[in-house]
Amino acid sequence: MEEIKQPGHLHPMTQMIHQATRALERLGFSVALGPEIETEYYNFDALNVPADHPARDMQDTFWLTADNKDGRRLLRTHTTAVDVHYMEKNKPPLAAVSIGRVFRNEATDATHEAQFFQLDGLMVGRDISMANLKAVLEKFFQELFGLELKIRLRPSYFPFVEPGAELDVSCFRCAGKGCPLCKQTGWIEILGTGMLHPNVLQAVQLDPEVWSGFAFGVGLDRLVMLKHGIGDIRWLCSGDWRFIKQF
Amino acid sequence: MLISHKWLQNYFDKSLPWAKDVAQALADHIFEIDEIRDLANDQVLDVDVQPNRAHDCLSHRGIARELSAILNRSIAALPISADLSLDKDMTVKVVVDDAKLCRRYQARVVSGVAIAESPEWLKEALESIDQRPINNVVDIANYVMFDLGQPLHAFDADKVVGDVVVRLARAGEAMTTLDDQELTLDPTILIIADDQGPLGVAGIKGGKRAGVTQETKRLILEAANFDPVLTRRASAKLTLRTDASKRFENGMTVTLTAEAMDKFSQLLQQTIGGDIKFGPVTDTNPKLPTKRAVEMESKDFTRLLGVEIKPETIVDILTRLRCKATWHEDQLRVVVPEDRLDLNVQADIVEEVGRLYGYDNIPNELPDLGLKTAPNKSEQLSNKIREVLISQGFSEIHSHTLVAKGEVEIANPLASDKNFLRADLSTSLQQKIAGNLPHLLFEKEAMKLFEIGHVFSVGKERINLAIGIGWRTAKYKQEGVLTEIWGGLKKSCGLKVDVETKQTDALEYLEMEDLETLADEMGGPLDVDLTPYLKLDVRFQPVSLYPRIVRDLALFVPIDTESSAIGTIIADQAGELLVEGPTLFDQFEKEGRVSYAFRSAFQAVDRTLTDDEVNQIMDRVISTLEQQEDWEVRK
């Protein structure tokens, strides 16, 4: 028997990361990477989430046993932490996308894992506004899910942005008509976003009177699940051939 | 927070819109609504109050104020207390040890109290938001908390010995709570005490000793403002989270205690009546907070929102939010309501105007920053490795970071087998290869996997690559596959390093350390193309947990027959129970004909298939194949 060389399979998460990254690159974003172990400063303090603030409850955190000289260490709860590093090292105007594994100390089930992938986008310039935020995010999701897609913003709260918003996209399964995927609303809640809080800009020595910017963060596991109809998040990290070979 | 539509209506003269429309108005302009519940004669909204507004919106009045701003309807003021029966001789002395920890403490004595069941309206209101009615005094305290957001407490005055003291607990002090929990206190925990010891944990839970019972005749009412951080820490330490602690830890304005004490007293008077008498209010800090103002310019709005909003519209919106906004030419002065602790800087005011103006009314405008993207070498290297390995038949997995063994430990793990960060990738890769081998269709086939991911050792985090290939038994093993693969990777990625391959009986693997350093040492940018491997439209097919049945089928066909034509017929006839194949695994020519052999696997998602079922399928396949001219199934 002659062996026919079949190509292997690229993990669907990597496919999503690749697509999202390329789409954002076309919008001017550079790729930024950062460590999964962070200090309390980069994950929380610099992002306007001081110790003892109830906003810390929004993200249950894994702490490491040994502290180091930079203070308490943790597993990053969001790749927004990379934004801070990036703004420290690069001068505005700038735009960066950071994608990687993040961790939340939460019980796991079919839709929650203690680890998942997050994409965080950041754009800073003179007079960057919510109008820019809306345009960039609409364009980004149109590239990912189709050109007819629409977005909408609803008020929300994340400590590192002000104003803060939640972004919905029109359902890519039913094109906004209403279906089980979007629970008949025509919209799917996708991400948190907003204009960088002045305290965050100040933490990286940027004058909020001169510079403004926006950030957005989206959990990619859910996007992969929605896109491919995967009912249980645990498949993504299963390493199971019966899952991998389908992609 | 649960919000009763009927309760909310108390704040408005005209009828509110239906709960569904109220929910939509709130969702569009302030809070998401998790659920709308239909009760017999009420509707209840589960409002997702975010932490930045927990200090003023964990209450019906807070939500009513938001609705009033959104719907542009005026809101009813709280009635002024005029009809209380006062007794100025009934006083209570309050000593606050440290005014930073307890910013205000108001207390008053009430006599002539008769503990009884609450009136229907009160029970109904509390039940609508899932609160269990207890007795008139406790229920009124709860009602006012859910109405105004200020937690309240009532002590049995006859069980309090001496003055009411607000102080840190002493080491070794203990307290039994109203619901019989034993708490051990320490000097980080603020308590309310009398001469005999703790009466309650400040802002968290009342104690049993001076708790209200059926026999209670006299009360001491408490409306206080405790330090948010202290409350939060104590609540975490005691693992006691209550409706009160949730509110205190978010902080609230000190003016709220007076409003709540007033409403508490009025409702007691109305509900209990009779001989009830109220002493004067002892107040440790009657000073009102100074008014806060934010100064800004019209460009602050345009700059952040990206749309020009008329000055009079800005004033209108801010007025609806109870701010006093005045323009002096291009300068705007916004005096904020003292209960809105979240309004401090210009961006806060911009958000208020933006969310009521409506984010839908902001146009989309692509920015033009003239940015050039810089390629990330580490990402490029990872993707090039993926491209090469996948072209060579290797598949990518992602596995868990949190594992049972490693060097870097989690202080608060989710489970005892997830308390370390992985120190390498190849440990799990070997397990996955072994676990997956039975899922392959052929005994001789190799399982080829790789992973790229972060690994951790003490003081060091790096991105590794592990590649592995495994066979079912050692007899199928081919030597040197990975050496060849690594050679190809080095060439494609411009790498100079070598890596040792490791062997077990039926498995070969390697782990390359620190791709980021490798990427730094690598030459120019890489040309990466993953597009051939993107399967963006795949719909995931659920995997059956039941066993599969494998069948082989071989047949002679005329020499010019395409094997794919045979495969199509088999697949068509096999139907939906066919889960893998038909895969061609053997072919040879003999006497002017060609023999093809196919393997197929059958499996049901909901049951174990029987041999009989699969035999029937195969019979159908065979008879269809044999209907073709000159096709002969080998038996």
Image: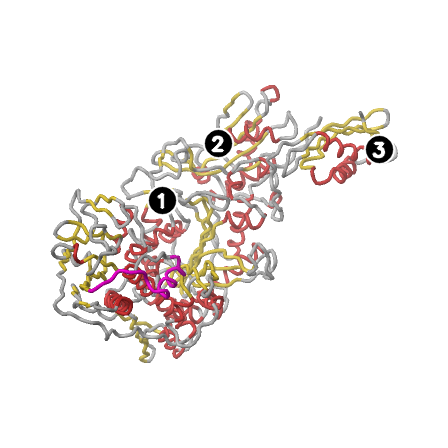
Q: Position of residue A231 (x, y in %)?
A: 55, 46
Percent position of residue B574, x then y:
74, 37
Answer whether residue B405 is visible to the viewer in this image.
yes
Say which residue label 2 marks.
Answer: B428
Q: Nearer the viewer, mark 3 or mark 2?
A: 3
Q: Nearer the viewer, residue B304 or A174?
A: A174
The subunit carrying tag 3 is: B
Chain letter for the residue marked with disc 2 in the picture: B
- N-terminal label among 3 and 2: 2
Image point (36%, 36%), residue name: B460
Neighbourhood count class around disc 2 (C-alpha, 10 Å): few under 14, some 14–19, many 20 upward: some
Q: Secondary structure at mark 3?
A: helix
Q: Amino acid at mark 3?
A: Glu
Q: Which residue is mark 1?
A: A38
Q: Marks 2 and 1, how far apart in space?
A: 24 Å
Q: What is the x, y in percent for residue A211?
A: 37, 62
Residue at position x 32%, y 62% from top?
Answer: B118
